[in-house]
Amino acid sequence: MPVLFDFTGAITAGGRSSRFGSDKALAVLRGRPLLRHVADSLGGCSVRLIVAPAGKYALEGWETVPDTRPGEGPLAGLEAALTHAPPGWLAFTGVDLPGLTPAFWAALAASRTPHSRAVLPLDPEGRPQPLAALYHRDLLPHIQTLLDAGERRLRLACPAGQSVHVGGLSEALWNVNTPAELARYIDPGP
């Protein structure tokens, strides 16, 4: 029985994939596109959004929403997702994190507090990772203000003191930016 989540799922898939050399959302890992791996981790969300150009991707049960500021990076993707999401929490991730699982998202959700507005996992070096995190819709005005001022860094999406950081999840955070990184996961070698 699938895990059911009380938050919206959103994947930003509108990037240029410049380091990958082709559309990494469609790159195949273990018989499935990277987009499908990430989407499966959020299958328990009743509302599921893909932030991408219209008609670029089609996943059953997922609504494609346009990037509000094309070419402005993941902070703009988060703005688009929060704009289209119902009130409450949103799981936001990139298409290049195929190690995410329902258990990863459940662990983040369990770490929310009444006063937090973001929940971010920590990487192996203890740094918060903003591209596989939970964000509250209340952050939308803050994010819009950042973008209007020319800010593009996703790590600033939540004001200081309003985020929770969660350790012990870094094994899910492996990222695929190049064909060589993908090949390493297809055939990890000796």
Image (cartoon, grey):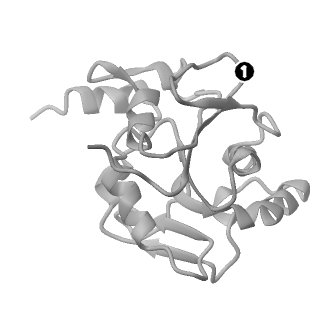
Task: Identify the residue at horizontal 44%, vertical 43% (top origin).
Answer: 42
Residue 15: x percent and y percent?
Answer: 64, 32
| In the image, farthest residue toward the right | 148
Task: Identify the residue at horizontal 37%, vertical 60% (top origin).
Answer: 106
Identify residue for label 1.
54
Q: Quadrant of the C terminus?
A: top left
Task: Identify the residue at horizontal 49%, vertical 74% (top origin).
Answer: 112
Count of numbered labels shown in the rendering: 1
Question: 8 above or below 57?
Answer: below
Q: The residue under label 1 is which amino acid type?
A: Ala
Question: 20 above or below 107?
Answer: above
Instruction: Please tell me whether mark 1 sits on a helix, a strand or a loop.
Output: loop
Task: Give residue 41's quadrant in the image.
Answer: top left
Residue 157: x percent and y percent?
Answer: 69, 63
Q: Nearer the viewer, residue 90 or 100?
A: 90
Q: Classify residue 78 as left or right of residue 171.
A: right
Residue 26: x percent and y percent?
Answer: 47, 19
Q: Nearer the viewer, residue 79 or 83?
A: 83
Q: Quadrant of the N terminus?
A: top left
Task: Identify the residue at horizontal 29%, vertical 18% (top origin).
Answer: 31
